[in-house]
Image (cartoon, rainbow, N blue to C red):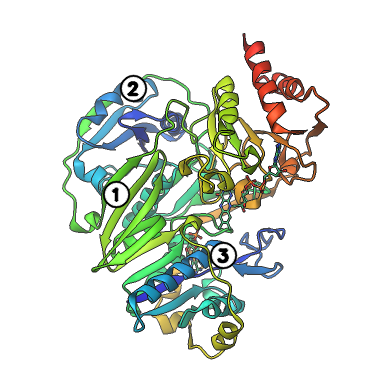
Amino acid sequence: MAEVLVLVDHLDGVPKKVTYELLTKARDLGEPSAIFLGAPGQSAAALEGLARYGAEKVYVAESEDITGYLTAPKAEIVAGLIAAKSPVAVLFPSSAEGKEVAARVAVRTGSGLLTDAVDLAADGTATQSIFGGAVEVRSRVSTGTNLVTLRPNSTPPVEQSGAAAVEQLTVELSDSAKGAWIVESVVEGKGGRPDLGDASVVVSGGRGVGAADGFALIEGLADSLGAAVGASRAATDAGWYPHQHQVGQTGRTVSPQLYVAVGISGAIQHRAGMQTSKTIVAINKDPEAPIFELADFGLVGDLFTVVPALTEEIIKRRG
Amino acid sequence: MNIVVLVKQVPDTWAERKLSDSDKTLDRASVDVVMNEIDEYAVEEALKVKEASGDDSTVTILTMGPERAVETIRKALSMGADKAVHLTDEALHGSCALQTSYALAKVLETLHYDLVICGSESTDARLSIMAPLLAERLGRPQLSGARKLTVGDGTARIERQTENGYDVVEAALPAIVSVVEKINEPRYPSFKGIMAAKKKPLTTLTLADAGIEADRVGLASATSSVESFSNRPPRQSGQIVKDEGDGGSRVADFLASQKFL
Ligand SMILES: Cc1cc2nc3c(=O)[nH]c(=O)nc-3n(C[C@H](O)[C@H](O)[C@H](O)COP(=O)(O)OP(=O)(O)OC[C@H]3O[C@@H](n4cnc5c(N)ncnc54)[C@H](O)[C@@H]3O)c2cc1C
Ligand SMILES: Nc1ncnc2c1ncn2[C@@H]1O[C@H](COP(=O)(O)O)[C@@H](O)[C@H]1O
């Protein structure tokens, strides 16, 4: 059966949920093989999960150079694998990095690329949602290898055991892959909650939250729902919440099952990052706030009374 | 220091955008157009680098797009850029991102640059991959997603948002940088700037002028093709309720009805 390559998205070796979604989709197109790229020793944490979601092979490349330089080393390795294995398709996570790696692979291999797909058919046709969800487009790559980046939460991950046979790759990078070196990687804490991209529920706070302290309310609501925390630019710029939680055009793009916007007006740049969410709930004291145009359920009220009551109610009902 | 800024003209995001029925490309003729918002930040950053590094620096605007994209070029010049190159040709219509990057790279190869600065994402295509595409094509380092840029001693250093913090990334010049809106606050063109922009040099290039093979760009040879599209019915307007003291439980009721509780 034709081989389909999947680029593993992971944190310190542990695959993110989107990796399992990609493996699930890959099975519709052929036989999935995972590509694990990381620092030495990291793949150990990945193999069990990759086997559980149907990876027949796992190509492993581990080197300080992969994590020490921006994007290009990964692209070089993936392009090399494409040349060696002639897969029918390569699936990437639609994260900022996944898209950048895919872009470079496309140039290197002379292939077409479809980004931000929300669905992928067995014949390789990708569905994209554009113009703020107003138009759905079905496209296919017509040149080279079919390269697709798939948004997290596009498909439910389904378990199916695979052999996950490891094939070690030797890492010999060209000089041009080492053009941009990472001087420092700063981790800004707010751990412990699901990752924004992976989360099936996201609760976001905006300027209405009023202060950094106010985000305790947002976190409380998020925790009652097992959700990730997001923020508008107004809230991240004010320093109320770390920048990596910004949802929107220049922040993260999320499409969870449920998105709860609290004290967020719904500016077009914010919508760009959340409007493909399946269900949207908005809490805002201004009945004219544009976020209500998107909301499946909107509550016009003061978040400082509504959110605590809601959190308490959820905890009560969930027992 | 020679800086080239990539500026794109896009439909106003507030306007209704649609795909044309005939060739399934963005219907650009029927809508209001503006400078892609983030590209204003790219222009601003270039002007700042120029101001910091001295008078013999130049900022060149590079735009690929239809004739009317000149309006956008003028705006960038009125902000303070020195000159502009406009690649425009009927044959470019319908080019995909890969072809666009090919065409832009061909033009960039003829310009002398230490830095290329582009926006992180356009509001119409929303691909946000121009910096890696150009870096790969030109064999230059990629410094993408910059929320801070420092240039000096033949290197450029950026701060780039990651999913759990940020990275500091450095590269030797010439390099390809893309910026996010956190990087600065773009200036407004002054009256003097607007007047001066009219006299600034603008070079218009056709495909032939730029040495770009016509079969490498345009709809017919795009690397991906649209099979079909459907306009989705506008989102059903939801239920909006006013808090009467029971707001918390009303939201909880809705969440329960949708099986989230
Ligand atoms: C190039 C560019 C890129 C951008 N990228 C992004 C991006 O990625 N993400 C993003 O979010 N923004 C982005 N923005 C900014 C965007 O335009 C808006 O300014 C921003 O989203 C506004 O944030 P907000 O909704 O929290 O604030 P506001 O628009 O000020 O809205 C606050 C809302 O809170 C409500 N409120 C206030 N008090 C209460 C209360 N007690 N109870 C209930 N409701 C209350 C108000 O009614 C109001 O609707 C970008 C802008 C530019 C120019
Ligand atoms: N046709 C174009 N002409 C000039 N610059 C462009 C063009 N298309 C994209 N860009 C640049 O690439 C960035 C990202 O655009 P995109 O890849 O379309 O999301 C933009 O912010 C511009 O700086």
Look at the image and tell me in which quarter the N terminus of chain A lies: top left
Point out which mark residue A51 bears: 2
In this view, the mark in front (2 or 3): 3
Point out which mark residue B36 bears: 3
Write down the residue under mark 1: A79
Q: Quick one: SS at disc 2?
A: helix
**Chain assignment, label 2:** A
Q: Report which quarter residue A291 is drawn in.
A: top right
Judge by depth and name the residue closer to the eye, B19 or A176.
A176
**Chain assignment, label 3:** B
Disc 2 marks a residue whose amino acid type is: Ala
Q: Quick one: SS at disc 1?
A: helix
Residue at position x 18%, y 57% in the image: A175
Judge by depth and name the residue closer to the eye, A129 or A30.
A129
Q: Quick one: SS at disc 3?
A: loop
Query: In this rendering, is residue B181 above or below A132?
Result: below
Q: How many marks?
A: 3
